Amino acid sequence: MKKYRLKLTTLEFRFLQSILIRLAEAYKNNLPDNIAHQILIELYESRFNVSVVDQNLEKTLVLNRSVVLAFHQFLNEIPLSGDADLLRNQLFNQFDVFLQS
Amino acid sequence: MKIKGDLWLFNPHCELSILKEQQHYTPPKMIKKVQNDLSVLLAWLVGDGDSVLIEKQVVNKAWKELLHSVVGIDFKFVTSKEVKESKIAFNAVKSWGKSPSLVSDFHFLPPKYQQFYEWNRQLKDVFHRQFGYNILTYIIDNEVNRAISSTRIGKFCLDYQEVVNEIENVFIKNSFGVIMKLPYSSSGRGILVLKRNEITPSVQKWIESALNQQGSVLVEPLLEKEFDFSLLFKKHNNTIEFLGGSSFLAGLTGQYYGSGLNTFRSYFSDLEWESIMKIITLIKTKLKDEKRLEGHFGIDALVFKGANGERFIHPCVEINPRYTMGHVTLGLQKAVPLHKKAEWRIVTKHEVTDFVAFQKEMEQKHPLSIHLNKVQSGFLPLVDVNLVQNYYAYLLVEDEEI
């Protein structure tokens, strides 16, 4: 199965980290019934649960299709505004292209 | 066999099905969730004796009675199973939007209803962005005061180099940004915003994939938006009726969050309002003989800030040739006294983790008062909280008068 290499700038990494933290917090006391959310919480715990990210650091994550699908769904449903909405738009479209290829 | 009014289906996936031109179209999970949770909003569009198709049968009786008391007409929620087993007969079948997949959406109905949802291939052109773009250029050609100028609207590009050149051109004139749109897009898909004049590999991929799939990309200057609004119409043969307008809250790429009620006029100055009236007349003139367009439609527009801070109207960002949330807003407006400040909102699980607790809290904080079939003040759930999973909707009427 084709994997997706997601290159993230520090800003994008922090953005994804911040929305995944909120997702993980929402499920602090119960297990997610939504599989996409479950996949993203697992990803958060394995790759995003770090406190310091170097400035100007490019991070590359290799994601399988189910994780990309989960991100694609999650980014579409969260309400955001301003710069966060802009970052969401960029990442959503990257995943969209991959999923359609 | 019982004869009922019309049967209504909420099919927010209509645009996606049109793009794919598939009769047997399976919507993405996220659209399916919107459909399951928000079908009941059609209660604000239906007529006396009509039925709204929903997924689950067991709608809470107390909530349904509450809804009936403000909708003010007799309507029912039905499931496909119920329709099939009880052989309920309808006068007509209606949907949120026409699409090729209505055939499979209404698979449970006998063939005699097919006349109501037969797909006409020519309708696809009405959903293409070019259709709305033609309305926009027609309005601009008629020189409406305070309307966007022709130098600030977008351009359809047919190949990669043309897109790149146009992005460059737009950034020279407008440093705020560029927005690229696919001819067919919905639910936040098919729209890419650039704030910097930089074609990264992922942006390049997006453009190439867009051109490959849909043949063109609309490249527009990103405008400094003050607020979004929509103009709502109904067309029957050669007559177009303007139903009203609504200002709404939306994300960068069009995700709908809700709308204020009774306040539409107050968003505009007297001069702007004159322009809005002229725009409505022009839209009616342009579309009255358009045979492919029939029924309810909405035109999304916005007010933006120019370089010197003055306000301009973008009179047609896109046309939605179907029912829209704006039509729902107009329905809701009938349930609220004209002088009362009110809003309705759609919230997701990401804003409100526990819908049941949220509803309880809001009901306590804003006790509901209904008089003469109108919500005088308070919080009214627009969905059955026990049946929704990801989306919740409510109406909040304040004590405050406008």
Image (cartoon, rainbow, N blue to C red):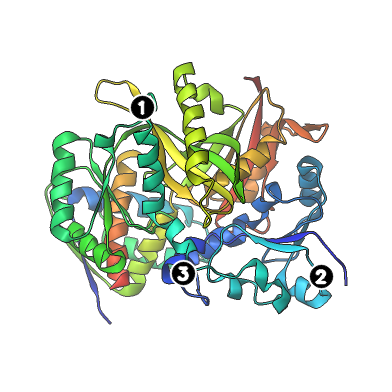
Which of the 4 image quadrants contains residue B137?
top left
**Separation of marks 1 and 3 at Cα, in angstroms:** 45 Å
Residue B312: assigned label: 1
Q: Confirm whether circles 1 and 3 share one chain.
A: no
The type of residue carrying mark 1 is Phe
Task: Determine whether the residue tagged by mark 1 lies in a helix, strand or loop.
Answer: strand
Chain identifier of the residue bearing label 1 in the image: B
Residue furthest out toward the bottom: A1
Q: Nearer the viewer, residue B137 or B66?
A: B137
Image position of B77 with respect to B274: above or below: below
Q: Position of residue B11 (x, y in %)?
A: 57, 62
Q: Is residue B57 visible?
A: yes
Choose between B328 and B160: the one closer to the eye: B160
The residue that appears at 13% across and 50% down in the rendered structure is B165
* Disc with the residue nearer the chain's start (1 vs 2): 2
Query: Alpha-carbon distance for marks 3 and 2?
Result: 37 Å
Image coordinates of residue A91 in percent, x first then y, are 28, 56
Q: Vertically, is B85 above or below B327?
A: below
Badge 3 crowding class, 10 Å Cα cut-off, few under 14, some 14 to 19, many 20 or more, is few
Question: What residue is pinned by disc 2?
Answer: B88
Is residue B384 or residue B218 the one in the foreground? Answer: B218
Amino acid type of disc 2? Answer: Ile
User: Do we see residue A31 in this rendering?
Assistant: no
**Can you identify the residue that label 3 sits on?**
A35
The quadrant of the rendering that contains the N terminus of chain B is bottom right
The part of the image, by quadrant, that contains residue A72 is bottom left
Q: Callout 3: residue from which chain?
A: A
For image coordinates 31% across by 71% down, the residue present is: A100
Left or right of A77, for residue A12? left
Look at discs 3 and 2 and give the one toward the viewer: 2
What residue is drawn where x is 36% and y is 47%?
A: B133
Number of marks:
3
